[in-house]
Amino acid sequence: MTPGSLRYYKVKLDRKELDDDKPSHNLADEFLRTVFTAMVRRMWQSKQSNTQDLGPTPTSIFLSEINNLVDRNLLSSDDLFDLYSITNTNTILFIRDMVVYLEFCAAIKEGDVGRIEEILKRITIMLQSGKHSNYALELLRFRFNIQHRWSENRKNAIFSSLLMNTKGLPHRWIPSDMYQASYLQIY
């Protein structure tokens, strides 16, 4: 079990209900947000306690890299492993991925399909560079169809069916497939 990995935090936080065989979106989402918040708070506390130091320390250098993370969000993980320990590299990669995930969740909640389309570009690259190239290929096909094959009417029909707002209230949009899955679980 590698320190800084999600499995490490799952064990440390005693999250037995997070079962790999029966994934639950809500439990996984809550777990990821908890770990992310704890990491960001810890880095902020470290930054606050290091502001009185006179010279750069490994922690301040590490935190400086985190601050530049969004600008370099596609940095190769191999480069990170060359620069930092496994724990720090896992932290950087997790925070990078969580920033994209949180932006994606916010775009869904607001019903902003244009923003979702932009975020999917980043997600495609992230999936391609990881172990999920089949998902990346499907997103590339989706993107190709949007830009080159589908008519405006078809694009509008597809985009308007991606999200649902069953309450009719602002910031209450959900993915259509998630609504359908929860409906099927009830019945």
Image (cartoon, grey):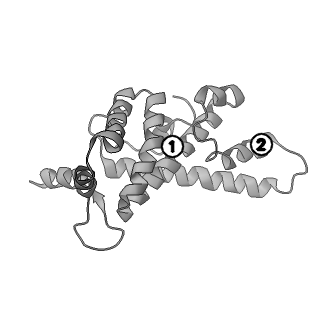
Q: Is residue 86 above or below residue 14?
A: above
| Residue 21 position by quadrant | top left
Nearer-N-terminus badge (2/1): 2
Residue at image location 58% in from the left, 35% down from the top: 90
Helix, strand or loop at disc 1? helix
Tag of residue 61: 2
Q: Which residue is mark 1?
A: 97
Cα–Cα gap, marks 2 and 1: 21 Å
Q: In front here: 128 or 11?
A: 128
The type of residue carrying mark 1 is Asp
Look at 38% across and 33% down and name the residue there: 136
Residue 100 image position (x, y, % from top left): 49, 48
In the figure, 102 relative to 80: above or below?
Answer: below
**Rendered view: 56 above or below 116:** above
**Count of marks placed on residues:** 2
> Which residue ends up furthest to the left in the rendered image?
187
Q: Position of residue 173 (x, y in %)?
A: 31, 63
Q: For the residue marked with disc 2, what is the amino acid?
A: Ile
Q: Label 1 neighbourhood size at 10 Å, few (<14), some (14-19), many (20+)?
A: some
Q: For mark 2, give the secondary structure.
A: helix
With 16 as the anchor, is 88 left or right in this view?
right
Residue 72 appears in which quarter of the rendering?
top right
Marks 1 and 2: in contact by CB < 8 Å?
Answer: no
Q: Position of residue 129 (x, y in %)?
A: 48, 29
Determine the residue positioned at 47% across, 35% down. Answer: 125
Query: In the image shown, does 123 or 35 lie closer to the viewer?
Result: 123
